[in-house]
Image (cartoon, rainbow, N blue to C red):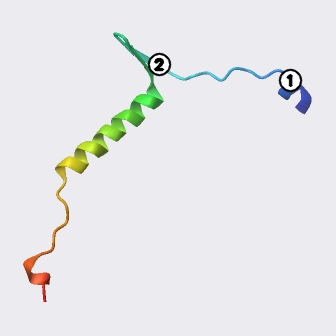
Amino acid sequence: MTSQLLATPQPVPAGAIVQWGWLTITVANLLVVLGMVVVFVLALVLPFPTAHEDDEP
């Protein structure tokens, strides 16, 4: 049984594909790219933590 599975590999489906003009991308990759864009925008918008004047000795 195991030798039959190894002898005839089946192709793995790529998943859902989105086509928009010249751009063709899988839904999984599109979600990863959108998540990276959201993290990048949050890194630009959120302020860095700063020390308060009350915390200094």
Say which residue label 1 marks: 7
| Count of numbered badges drawn on the protein | 2
Residue 1 visible? The answer is: no
Residue 13 visible? The answer is: yes
Q: Classify the position of the N terminus by image quarter.
A: top right
Front one among 50 and 26: 50
Q: Is residue 2 above or below residue 41?
A: above
Question: Helix, strand, or loop for circle 1?
Answer: helix
Say which residue label 2 marks: 17
Q: Classify the position of the C terminus by image quarter.
A: bottom left
The answer to whether mark 1 and mark 2 are in CB contact below 8 A is no
Q: Residue furthest bottom?
A: 57
x and y percentages locating residue 29 in the rendered image:
45, 30
Label 2: how many Cα within 10 Å (few below 14, some 14–19, many 20+): few
Give the quarter of the image for residue 25. Answer: top left
In-image side of 19 versus 15 (left or right)? left
